[in-house]
Amino acid sequence: MSVFQQIVRTHETAILNGWMKEISIATRRSDLMNDAEMRQQSSEFLHLFTEATQVSSEVRSDAFAAAREFLKGVAKSRMEQGFTASEISMFVLSLKQPVFNVLRDEFKGDASKLVTEIWTSGDLLDKLAMMTVDAAIELREQTIARQQEEMMELSTPVVKLWDGVLALPLIGTLDSGRTQVVMESLLSAIVETNSQVAIIDITGVPTVDTLVAQHLIKTITAARLMGAECYLSGIRPAIAQTIVHLGIDLVDVQTKAKLSDAFKIALTRLGKAVVSIKNHPAARAEEQ
Amino acid sequence: MALKSETYTIRSSDDVVRVRQIARAWASEIKLSLVDQTKLVTATSELARNTLEHGGGGAMTAEMVENGIRRGIKLTFTDQGPGIANLELALQDGYTTGNGMGLGLSGSKRLVNEFDIKSEPGLGTTVTIVRWK
């Protein structure tokens, strides 16, 4: 066991004061955090750190569990406050200077001892700092994963255009994961609404390659198996030419350039039509 | 001579989307028409997915090339995967070793002006495409 642990304990207050000064130079974000809050957080961590170092010098050990938890909390609250990852790591790293200062005063005449102690304590603080950054990054990743999920749900709305007519306006990139969601939501909507016609609109899909085409064909085939007719609309000129050159066969699929065209044939299929009420017998009867 | 050149790794399906966006950005930079942009992007999508799925990941090098007053985008896809034993067969419409449509390679060839494929079984595959303005 090293000696720096005892020294840190004896000089806790001095270190805290030095640390606060260091923080105010290096990472102070007075716009994000006030002094009292900062001091309270720092003194709490220093205390946990001192306690843990008395028992072990391995940051992954149980002795450091409380300190690790605390840093995770710090990372979380600071991420939410808008600190960057490097600013968060500086919280721990800025503790080095005051600790080294104390060690320097203690081992004035013994250079080799001083280096050993500085190395041990520095290594420990580095590892804790990295742990804090890891925690911060993990939080970011969680946010990204959650947003991806939300986006996937948001981007596959099945809407009802008319009794028996569903539309699925697709927007964005269709990868295998998303297509699965799209397919499921469309097929279950067909059952729920008892629809005979479903229109898949790809106006918002930037690239239609063989994978996307294959997914679309599979979805359309599955819908057909359930007794619903599926139309594909929103095929832009550039996409149409690309599909032809790629050699994708969409002959079996009823396609239209515009969603309104697809809607029109859907109504025809259901034996319905949209008519102008002007000059219509029913409208005239109402006027009289 | 290449006016500019950049290499991007392809390791996940997110990377496929990324290189596609890069292809689109470069294509619009040399003012390719919308149709030609779409063709290049679609070919990029096919070849990048091949690199990922059959080659086990690799890289795409994008180059802006010049030939007289004509400008073009040259994309090179490389992987160190198992390679293709029979190129003639692989370039046939409808032939697939996976469960795709079998149009990726042959279709991409039709979408670009220049298409070159080199493959060595056990060593990997390199596909180069060029779309001129």
Image (cartoon, coloured by chain):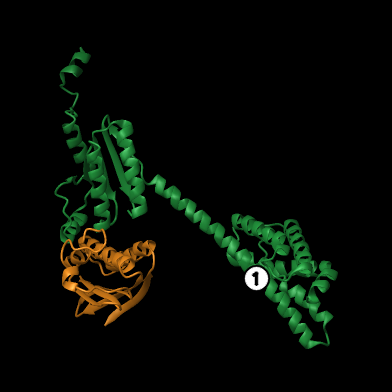
Which residue matches tag 1? Answer: A127
**Quadrant position of residue B115:** bottom left
> Where does the image place residue B20, in percent across and percent down from the top left?
32, 64
User: Horizontal placement of A64 versus B99: left or right?
Assistant: right
Q: Nearer the viewer, residue B2 or A172?
A: A172
In the rendered image of this protein, does residue A81 appear above or below residue B132? above
> Where does the image place residue A192, in percent across and percent down from the top left?
33, 32
Residue A84 visible, this angle: no
Shade representing chain A? green
**Quadrant position of residue A194:** top left
What is the quadrant of the N terminus of chain A in the image?
bottom right
Seen at 18% across and 56% down, the residue is A248
What SS does tag 1 mark? helix
In the rendered image of this protein, does residue B83 appear above or below residue A234? below
User: Horizontal placement of B107 versus A109: left or right?
Assistant: left
**Quadrant position of residue A7:** bottom right
Residue A125 visible, this angle: yes
In the rendered image of this protein, does residue A200 appear above or below residue A281? below
Shade representing chain B? orange
> Where does the image place residue A271, in percent across and percent down from the top left?
16, 28
User: Horizontal placement of A13 versus B55: left or right?
Assistant: right
Q: Nearer the viewer, residue A12 or A186?
A: A186
Q: How many marks?
A: 1
Q: Say which chain tag 1 marks.
A: A
